Amino acid sequence: MITALIDLMGTFYQAGNPAQMAVIARSMLTTIPGDLVALQFLGLALYQLGQTEAALRIFRRVAEKAEAGLQTDLATTVEAAAVTNYREATRPASGLADAWHRIGALLSKYDFHNAAERAYEASRCARGRAMVPPLRLAAPQE
């Protein structure tokens, strides 16, 4: 199911349909709350729809999560799904390389440079120019 949603996201991105991208991203967030892939693509879609303040709020959440690391237990279904989302959204056949690059540019524009670098790396992965970087996971809270 994750692969199908990522593929749909790529199809809607390539078709220039940010409204449908937002629908898919919100659907992913319903299933996987706080998912970084879905948040970034929702931010991109909102920005493309002219909802720049909402996009900024989303990108701020992305940057905060990227700085803090993922604070979830690796054994949870949600964490496994989030890792799968990232892997699928950065595979060369995803059709999302340009979208990741645009996300990186927007994150950089908003001065979220660490998160922007991760998006640029995702773009390189989706172009087949790099290995998919592992998600940085914080140590489980005791």
Image (cartoon, rainbow, N blue to C red):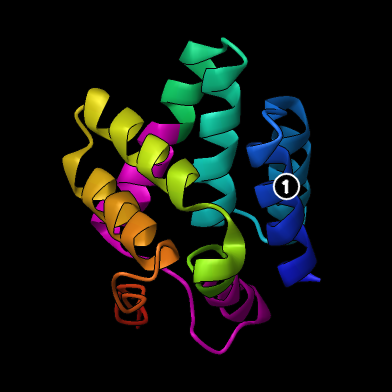
Q: Which of 15 and 59 is in front in this view?
A: 15
With respect to residue 126, does 102 lie above or below?
A: above
- Residue drawn 45% across the image and 44% down it: 98
Instruction: Locate the N terminus and report the quarter of the image it occupies.
Output: bottom right
Residue 96: x %, y % from top left: 53, 52
Q: Which of 13 and 58 is in front in this view?
A: 13
- Chief SS of the magenta region: helix
With respect to residue 56, does 124 lie above or below?
A: below
Q: In which quarter of the image is residue 12?
A: top right
- Residue drawn 72% across the image and 54% down it: 28
Residue 105: x %, y % from top left: 30, 33
With respect to residue 5, does 106 lie above or below?
A: above
Q: In which quarter of the image is residue 137?
A: bottom left
From the image, tell me which residue sits under label 1: 11
Magenta region, residue range: 59-85
User: Along the horizontal axis of the image, is 104 left or right of 13?
Assistant: left
Residue 22: x %, y % from top left: 70, 34
Question: Which three-letter amino acid code belongs to the residue tagged 1?
Answer: Thr
- Residue drawn 31% across the image and 64% down it: 69
Q: Which of 105 and 127 is in front in this view?
A: 127
Residue 44: x %, y % from top left: 52, 32
With respect to residue 104, does 51 lie above or below?
A: above
Q: Indicate whether residue 84 is drawn in magenta.
A: yes
Q: Is label 1 in a helix, a strand or a loop?
A: helix
- Residue drawn 66% across the image and 50% down it: 10
Q: Quadrant of residue 104?
A: top left
User: Along the horizontal axis of the image, is 47 left or right of 76?
Assistant: left
